[in-house]
Image (cartoon, grey):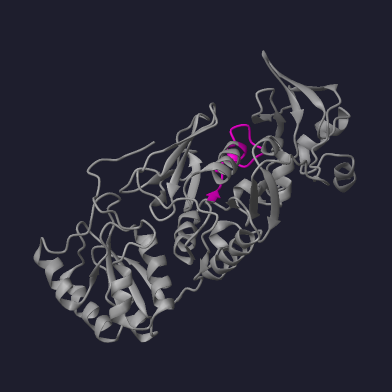
Amino acid sequence: MEPELEAEGLKGYRGRALKILHDACISVGDMVKITRGDAEYEGYLMPRSESGDDLHIVIKLGSGYNIGVNVTSASRIERIGAGVKPSYTRSTQQARRRGLRRVDIISTGGTIASRVDYRTGAVHPALTAEDLYSAVPELSELADVEAHILYSELSENITPQHWVGIAQKIAEVVKSGTDGVVVCHGTDTMAYTSAALSFALRNLPVPVILVGSQRSSDRPSSDAATNLLAAVAVASRAPFAEVAVAMHASSSDKRVCIHRGTKVRKCHTSGRYAFRSINSQPLAVFDLEQSDLKMLLPEYAMRDAERRLELMASFNQKVLLVKFYPGMDHQALEWAIEQGYSGLVIEGTGLGHVSRYLQDTVRKAVEAGMLVGMSSQCLWGRVNMNVYTTGRDLLGLGVVPLEDMLPETALVKMMWVLAQTSDLDEARRLLLTDIAGEISKRTLLDDQTC
């Protein structure tokens, strides 16, 4: 019986909940009222995850939030109106306003391009960049948008090969005359991609803004539309020409921080304010209510349409990022030496330290021709390996102190550096050269936010 009922419009429901809905002639999308004792709930009937139980009925309240109501034999459910069945209609034609600057949106996937899968209850990539444009019609007031679908990947699936592909696509649209680029990307590894693009896209003439969302666009608390609007506005009008990340500054919808691509980290698993600039102020802040961009850093690469982009999109993947911890076995580093790795970034403690028990293995790595750099596990502050004996010993072994670079930025930069040169002296020089704002001249003593 249940397959037939699903065809009637009760997708995902089974058992007791399915029978109750069927007997009441209710299908997904209908407006219903559920009465349990003195409590009443009204909302649109939503599909269920097939992996869910058969005890609850899910409805969307007027507030936009979904709730699950446990139904028993004493519960009463009635259909009080026919609703619109869940659907998504793709845009067939983009609205255009001539005279606006052109912004190219490149979609790679992630939550900002996602919908909830009601078969499993999971969030999965479902939208193309063009779908995003049609879902946020306000974009037509900000820019003449060109949409491109490049990948449909959750960010944990993004690899250095994807970085190369994204950089190449950006170079293509930049050379075609765009005024700015927006890259829709999942948030979990967006900081790695922003760092990679910061090194791969040399001499940028226009802004490249990565944007994501912490909440999928079918949730009432979604930050997808506001983040995208801010990213497009910044890409079209910002005075800088750098790679940056646009994400909410707080839990409210008032401001979006624009973070320099080499100085940003995701610091919260689910908060809309998850992204923070580390050892630096954000590059800028965009006021969503006033539609106003305010620059916060005094030094940045200026927008210049005459500048010619130089694409240097290659990365040596034989680089390892290792987090030191008490009792760490030296065999983890021995493995990298045996596998012929070209580089090693150590995420050390404090000012840049590892146990004395690892120092002999570090020496072997340097002697094997590996480029070894030291970053810190601390979020804020700067590596200084001259203060304590352990640090000085590591310096003597040939370990390169990586100033105030984030470990993930240091990893990406070393991958990029070792793809540009095989000469270790030149590689060390490039690693310690500030190329895309990854090394601050002065580390801030306190946390700076926008």
Q: Residue 297 at what x, y percent from top left?
A: 36, 43
Of residues 281 and 386, the one nearer the viewer is 281
Q: Residue 111 at what x, y percent from top left?
A: 60, 48
- Residue furthest out toward the top: 38
Q: Quadrant of the C terminus?
A: top left
Identity of the residue drawn at 55% across and 42% down: 237
Image vertical order of residue 192 relative to residue 276, above or below: below
Image vertical order of residue 208 relative to residue 331, above or below: above
Residue 118 visible to an observer of this rendering: no
Image vertical order of residue 296 relative to residue 334, above or below: above
Q: Quadrant of the N terminus?
A: top right
Residue 416 counted in the magenta span = no
Of residues 294 and 60, the one nearer the viewer is 294
Residue 261 lies in quadrant: bottom left
Residue range (magenta) = 209-225
Identity of the residue drawn at 69% across and 44% down: 144
Q: Residue 421 at what x, y percent from top left?
A: 39, 80
